[in-house]
Amino acid sequence: MIDTAASTHDTWDGVDLHTLADRLGTPLYVYSASAIRDRVSSLQTALRGTDHLICFAVKANPNRGVLAFMHSQGVGADIVSAGELWRARQAGIPAEHIVFSGVGKSEAEIAEALRQGVLRFNVESHDELLLLQHIAQAQSVVARAAVRINPDVDALTHAKISTGKAENKFGVSIEEARRWFAQRDALSHVQLDGLHVHIGSQILSLEPFRQALQRVAALWRELVGQGHPIASIDVGGGLGVCYREGHDRPIDAAAYVALVREALAGFEGRLLFEPGRYLVGEAGVLLTRVIRLKQGNERTFLVIDAAMNDLARPSLYDAWHDIAPVAGDARSMISYDIVGPVCETGDTFAKARALPACAPGELLMIRSVGAYGASMASTYNSRPLAAEVLVDAGRYAVVRQRQSFEDMVAGEQPANHWETA
Ligand SMILES: *Cc1c(COP(=O)(O)O)cnc(C)c1O
């Protein structure tokens, strides 16, 4: 939970939100460094005395300023593309603090990550394992690898962010993982000595984690019994956050870590964690202004200057985000459909949402947008990407300038140069 004393509605991590919006414009992403720091330290504290590395899932918030801040907190990176590798390195994160996940790593991406010396590849298919062996041999290096297990458990989350069921594209079955280890000697340039599991996102109960970890633990014990040393177990990410006050009850970090320790009791290698949403989700708010009120036949629309291109989660997953006026004065409540300017009916942030009566120009905050917010943004409807700012105990630093029209069309050109192929 974000410290409410430091973050009333008018301020966020000690910075006045009205001033920020006046200076930097809206829509504006605002991330609290204090909130991120609290989340990192809640995990680090619970993990004290255990060999571990927290690798932030870059896709949740790849802003270079955010990644540099993560690095300053001793956090590494979990990447899923060469672009994320590049961003992480630019932000100062050393290769030995980077793990590479994903079902579709290309030959070029694997080669680049190997050249840079990433800590570990989380391998998701036999084809990828053979490709990794081939590329490592060509580079005369030994790649460290973990097999991503698909434990076939239901993460009890939204279907589009569930990854650990047998029907999902991620990871391999336990039987297949066994075969990889049985044939380990054939891998001259891959050190297969890790296990990895990531069952999904926005998980609000310990039970799915317990089931997945029990299956991984059983496999680890079995493999060690067969003489296959396991140097690292990566337990993935997936810890949920609060999107709806009084409704979502996130798991306590200490309880989660206790569960991991219990399930993997006796494991003496390194534990890797890949939280994304948990570290940054609640730290972020999206500031937006009311453009106008529109009275429909049946509904009152509150048209705001943020849209689905800025924050896709409501249109993509029907996700709920708490929305509130920044000015917290008492007013009568009205039921609004809160919509953006984009020409899609799906550009709706909330339906029949009770909000204090709003006037045009009113500053609102959409909460819990620090993860999968700016990172999923597009310029649909030719709306330039929003600015992003990091705030920290009364100070702020812009970590992304608002995109200009020129930046938005960079790389586009008229078809002046025709070639044949
Ligand atoms: C997306 C992802 C994560 C992070 O998920 P969160 O729910 O944001 O914690 C971690 N590991 C892998 C492999 C992922 O794909």
Image: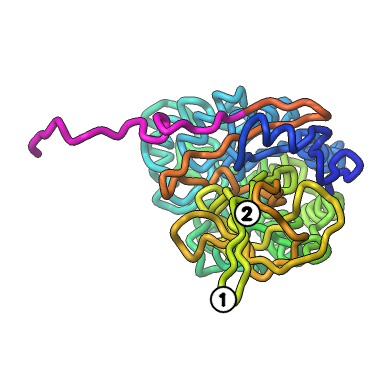
Where does the magenta region start and end?
399-421
Between 143 and 12, which is closer to the camera in this rendering? 12
Residue 38: quarter of image: top right
> Residue 189 location, x and y as percent?
46, 35
Q: Residue at x 74, y 48 (%)?
A: 282
Classed neighbour count for the residue bearing mark 2: other residues with Cα under 10 Å, few (<14), some (14–19), many (≥20): many
Quarter of the picture holding the C terminus? top left
Between 116 and 354, which is closer to the camera in this rendering? 354
Classed neighbour count for the residue bearing mark 1: other residues with Cα under 10 Å, few (<14), some (14–19), many (≥20): few
Q: Residue at x 50, y 34 (%)?
A: 143
In the picture provided, is 207 more to the left or to the right than 164? Answer: right
Q: Main secondary structure of the magenta part?
A: loop
Does the segment drawn in magenta span residue 408? yes
Q: Residue at x 58, y 35 (%)?
A: 387
Where residue 7 is drawn, which disc sits there? none
Where residue 297 is drawn, which disc sits there? 1
Between 335 and 410, which is closer to the camera in this rendering? 335
Residue underneath mark 2: 197
